[in-house]
Amino acid sequence: MSDGIPLLFLALGTLAGVWFLAAAARKQVANSKGDPERSNLIKQHGGEPRPNMEGTEH
């Protein structure tokens, strides 16, 4: 084997491992929220925005 091949395998394996751990963490957070599409903060506090204060319209 060439000197660069083991380094390439190590780099790709590291990237794959990081991707796998990130995907697992994302799934765990989504499951704990109960809804992977929207956060709980938006669900509970998603009302209409406040009106502008007088004199701040542009």
Image (cartoon, rainbow, N blue to C red):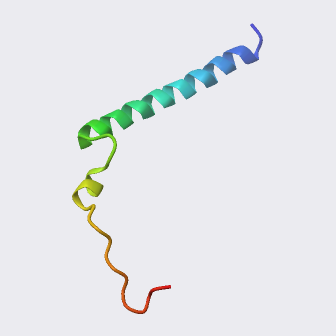
**Residue 4 lies in what quarter of the image?**
top right
Is 49 left, or right, of 1 in this rendering? left
Q: Residue furthest bottom?
A: 55
Disc tally is 0
Which residue does the image show at 50% across and 85% down from the upper left? 58
Which residue does the image show at 68% across and 20% down from the upper left? 8
Q: Position of residue 24 (x, y in %)?
A: 38, 30
**Residue 13 lies in what quarter of the image?**
top right
Q: Nearer the viewer, residue 8 or 34?
A: 34
The correct choice, above or below, for 35 with respect to 21 in the image is below
Is 27 left, or right, of 2 in this rendering? left
Q: Residue furthest top?
A: 1
The correct choice, above or below, for 38 with respect to 9 in the image is below
Is 44 left, or right, of 53 in this rendering? left
**Residue 20 lies in what quarter of the image?**
top left
Which residue does the image show at 63% across and 25% down from the upper left? 11
Q: Position of residue 9 (x, y in %)?
A: 63, 17
* Quadrant location, the N terminus: top right
Is 53 left, or right, of 35 in this rendering? right
Q: Position of residue 18 (x, y in %)?
A: 50, 31
Q: Nearer the viewer, residue 7 or 47?
A: 47
Which residue does the image show at 49% across and 30% down from the upper left? 19
